Amino acid sequence: MLLAVASTLVISSPALADGTLRDHAAERGKFIGAALATGPLSNEAPYSTIARTEFNQVTPENALKWDATEPNDNQYSFSGADQIVNFAVANNQIVHGHTLVWHSQTPGWVQGLNATAMRAAMQDHITTVVGRYANNAAVRSWDVVNEAFEENGSMRQSFWLNTMGQTYIADAFRFARAADPDARLCINDFNVEGINAKSTAMFNLVQSLRAQNVPVDCVGFQGHLAVQFGFPNQVQQNLQRFADLGVQVRITELDVRIPLPADDTELATQNTYYTNMISACNNVTACAGVTIWGFTDKYSWVPDTFSGQGQALLWDTNYVAKPVYNAVHTALDGGTPGDTTPPSTPGTLTASGITSTSVNLAWGASTDNFGVTGYNIYRDGTLLNTVTTTSTTVTGLTASTAYQFFVRARDAAGNLSPQSNTVSVTTAPGTGDTSPPTTPGTLNSSAVTSTSVTLAWGASTDNVGVTGYNVFRNNALLTTVTTTSTTVTGLTPATAYQFFVQARDAAGNVSANSNTVSVTTSPGTGGGCSVAATVQTQWSNGYVVQPITVTNTGTSTISAWTVTFTLPAGHTIVGSWNAAFTISGQTITARNMSYNGTLGPNASTTFGYQASRPNGNTAVPSTYTCS
């Protein structure tokens, strides 16, 4: 996000509570961070003092974005980034790099490239920027891909996607891993804090990428909140479901804006939202910490972006700590120390099944005080992959070549075990086969249902022999089969998909892609629904109802839902989200949006609204019906 700039110098006020935020975060084994801007960091003593004393993590707000580091092709500038990194090193703070691949603040010279040139530019940029700080122990993590999704859960139609296809995401992560094998690599987005269509799409992407050995090991939830729109649904549960994939999670850009002028109720709600976000992170072991997007209202991005809104941060424009500072302090204070105990060393690592291009590795399980979440596989000292089992097959090796492997266990808090023994492997001589199979014959689809489709294609040929076919769905590898047909299941009703296939041979050569076939699944039938509403907060002349949970109670998928309720006399709707509202007198009809109408059996989605009412009226709607 962009940061407003001002120049007035004022005097900082002391904190309102005992101890600093960073002290209490460290007691929990977490970080508490802030996004920093170079101007006030250099020119305003109160700004640098608060940044130094209150936070143990920093994120360069703009200084590491593409337009700041490489405004022209191969002309790099790191003055601002170095300033913030050096500040962090001097003050024993860790640095999160923001951001490498984003649709915004990327120079026009990048956006106009063709696919080949754009991929090369992306690789060069990531290699140069990440590589510059790879040996700096303070720079621990990066936002590799930022804001890749639309609100409905589809991929954002950015120049990256439109030019390179969805593979730009995997490419970016692989380039970043090559530039720094030890950094945490994150995908980051907004409006994904709760469980909704957008966060579920990101969950599915992360799961798919990790299944393809793409090094995504961190997910960032921005946390740009507003008191008038309600608190996100199931934040802690959402963080935990991502953590269960074996990734670290973090809140990356937290702020809570208020319509101005703010009243006492809105200020109290702001305190609650900050507390809720920090508590959610506290309660998830794999949540590394919380970064606030700035810390003083003097340099907040909010007023310039959201007209009539502001006061989103912990210090006011005069660097006086606000009551919300105490709320954050209290949420961090008195915590149980975080998990800092690493897993035990993995058992003896062995190698078997050595071919010219692959080897099987196996080892004994590690133990941990909370639980082992996975194992890092290292080849020649470089992180190769992360798995959740105690064995793996390493492919893509070169014939007649010596390799060394070891593994390390990791837990949900990110602690790494000592490395296992190192096993040396020399691959068998190769056949010399470098010829890929021919392109598969025409791909066709048939037997399309609400949840499945059958795909078939013509056989490829190869100078040695075809060993299988890779099947891709929406540009992501779905499965590998040995026949020339497959049935894809687990699809969503009334949803468009694209498929193509590749042939592969024993040497690992891959053919060109087949034609792409587009399929839209049929609508589901036979569903029913229920609805449950919760009044989240209320005040003398208004209230927020969130979440309103719609659940498919039928035995098959539904493709649409409608909720009806009646407002008490004198009440009016002033805002809504995740549903399309139709108002007729006091009767409200809420219908699904394009992205949340399809629900499988027992699946649910949520929406909400804010209403005003006569001052002193305590009534709220009580009856909701779903169809």
Image (cartoon, grey):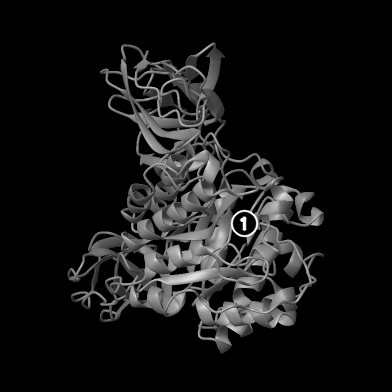
Regarding mark 1 in the picture, which secondary structure is present there?
loop
Say what amino acid the circle numbered 1 marks: Gln
Point out residue 67 in the picture as x, y percentages from the top left corner.
75, 62
Sort mark 1 into few (<14), some (14-19) or many (20+) by Cα contacts within 10 Å. many
Point out residue 454 in the picture as x, y percentages from the top left corner.
39, 23
Residue 4 placement: quadrant: bottom right
Which residue: 37% across, 48% down? 238
**Front one among 126 and 622:** 622
Which residue: 52% across, 60% down? 252
Res 248 seen here: no
Q: Is residue 532 above or below residue 326?
A: above
Instruction: Name the residue beneath numbered marker 1.
Output: 311
Q: Is residue 184 left or right of residue 257?
A: left
Q: Locate the N terminus by quadrant.
A: bottom right
Q: Is residue 510 left or right of residue 123?
A: left
Q: Locate the C terminus by quadrant.
A: top left
Q: Is residue 551 above or below residue 91?
A: above
Q: Residue furthest bottom?
A: 90
Q: Is residue 317 left or right of residue 184?
A: right
Q: Is residue 441 above or below residue 581?
A: below
